[in-house]
Amino acid sequence: MSGTLAHAGGAGGRFSPFTRCPECDLVTEPAAADYPTHRDGTVDWGRAVRVRCGACGHWHPVTLADVLPATTTHRCMRCATVTPCPSTAARVVCGGCGLSGLGPATADRTLTGQLLDTEYGQVLQQQARLNAAKQGRPERAAALGLSQPPAQASLVRVLEDAGDPVDAEVLSSAGQRPEASPMEDEGEVVEAELVEDGPDGAGGEVAVHDPRAAVLAALNKKAAETLYDRRPRKTKTGYARDWALWGEFHRWLKEQTGVALQLSDIDVGTFVGFVTWLDEVKLAAPSSLGRRVTGVCSEARRYGYTVPKEARAAATEAIKPLLLDEERQKRGRGKAAAITPDDLRKMNTAPLTRTPGPAASRARKVIVPELARLRDRALHTLRFAVAGRNQEMSMLDDSHIRLVAEGLEVRVPSVKGRPARDVVVSYGENLDTCPVRCWTTWQTAKLDAGAAPDGPAFLGVDQWGNLSPQRLSPDGCGRAITRSAKYAGLTGRRITGHSGRRGLVTTGRRKGKRSEKLRTQGGWAKNSPVFWEYVDEGDKWEDNATAGIGL
């Protein structure tokens, strides 16, 4: 039996083969199935087997040859269970918690759109079939506030998960079986739910849902998927890791108490317990706790779970004292240190021959290619001048930087949903740290080396001095300044891609620059606590409390 039938290998197992639907051309597990079994409960593939597509709802026959083998795995974002599946699967049902998630094939955005459009159309068809099924109960429709066509009966097939279809008959309001319509399709299958009719429980009827509510639900689902797809990749990855930690916390809690809570059990107790677990068991840095809770809240809402405000507030209160504990603060990497123009000068004039440290894996000396040195000089000085983030520096193109008589006019591109900003950069007072001269020198050198005009502003350079046509990645921009600081002897401080942003504000304030000018240059929000922390750092010696008081 194929590897994708592992869920249905024995009696009582879930019959879930992956097949390609001939109607919508998508690979999914069946939403329902009609199949015979042997005495031991396994599927009898020698007889007719039918499945209903999990995307479009189309019923079609399948054979064992139609079952697609599992060539990859799908990791559930809710419980982290790994489920085998074909690489062409559009949707995969988690073998642990049952969550239906996007399959590996949806890495293709075109196929993702096809899947969502197909599922949306299936919702509309389902509601139309339910309306047809309830035509014999006008009093039920009136109670629900729905428009009701003339009374007639319908024959509804209620499908069970792992058994044969069960026929349920719906009578007219007079309790009689009407004649079948000549236009009725005998192969039509209508999904419906039998519910108790009145307190006496006598008789069954079709549970009818408001079609407007179904359309709104489908639109909301598609909107949620669209908004999630537009999130930055790093944000989605980070929130997924937070949700995996939430699941790990629940498994740890089960080991301690013997009781398994649901991931949807979000209240004051579970959130405060989660914070305590991160602090005492995972030894997480205090500065990361708030982000973890935010990620769990975001993912919980995406899965349709309710996050009470009091639970979120309680978690925040539990984090506050941890942020003030000096011993706990040592767990994290710490904040990026601000750099100054003197630091930039040391980095830009460091020797090209770099001797490895005693702990280095390679003992030979490294000679920095001239092209890489020119790129790093331009990258560091321009980053400082525009207070650029790693991703902003990576996304800069030559067309974003215009040379004018006064210096440079730079359009910093939009990243992570932040608006683009237009800033100006003046000529510097020192040749080694002037962002205008460093930029024009690098631009001329890379064009001479074969770079495309109006291409990426900063390109990769290998250890032999060969220029890459690909733009320098955000991580590459961050590593470049950390590497330059190391070989310039700027040790003892954590210098990262964020050091330039912090350094512009602190240095600018010491030189008397207005806060509003600095805030606009770096694109901070008016109420950004991080920006005003930098301002306070730059102003701490200006008119300080002990200066000039006669001490």
Image (tube, rainbow, N blue to C red):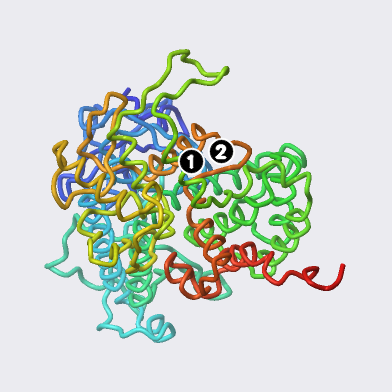
In the rendered image, the vertical position of residue 468 relative to residue 360, given as above or below: below
- Among the 4 quarters of the image, the one containing residue 213: bottom left
Q: Is residue 294 left or right of residue 64?
A: right
| Three-letter code for the amino acid on which mark 2 is drawn | Leu
Q: Nearer the viewer, residue 450 or 442?
A: 442
SS of the residue under disc 1: helix
Count how many numbered circles sit on residues in the image. Answer: 2
- Are the two marked residues, 1 and 2, in contact with CB atoms closer than 8 angstroms? yes
Q: Residues within 10 Å of mark 2 (few under 14, many from 20)?
A: some
- The residue nearer to you, when weighing 446 against 437, is 437
As drawn, which residue projects farthest toward the top?
A: 363
Return the x and y of residue 430 as percentages of the image width and height: 40, 52
What residue sits 16% from the left and 61% below the top? Answer: 185
Q: Secondary structure at mark 2?
A: loop
Q: Which residue is mark 1?
A: 346
Horizontally, residue 175 falls left or right of residue 82, namely: left
Q: Position of residue 432 (x, y in %)?
A: 39, 46
267 w.r.t. 442: above or below: below
Q: Which mark is residue 536?
A: none
Q: According to the image, label 2 marks what residue?
A: 490
Q: Quadrant of residue 182?
A: bottom left
- Identity of the residue drawn at 49% across and 31% down: 487
Earlier-in-chain disc, 1 versus 2: 1
Q: Quadrant of residue 177?
A: bottom left
Q: Badge 1: few (under 14), some or many (20 or more) residues near its Cα, within 10 Å?
A: some
Quarter of the image containing the N terminus?
top left
- Residue type beneath disc 1: Lys
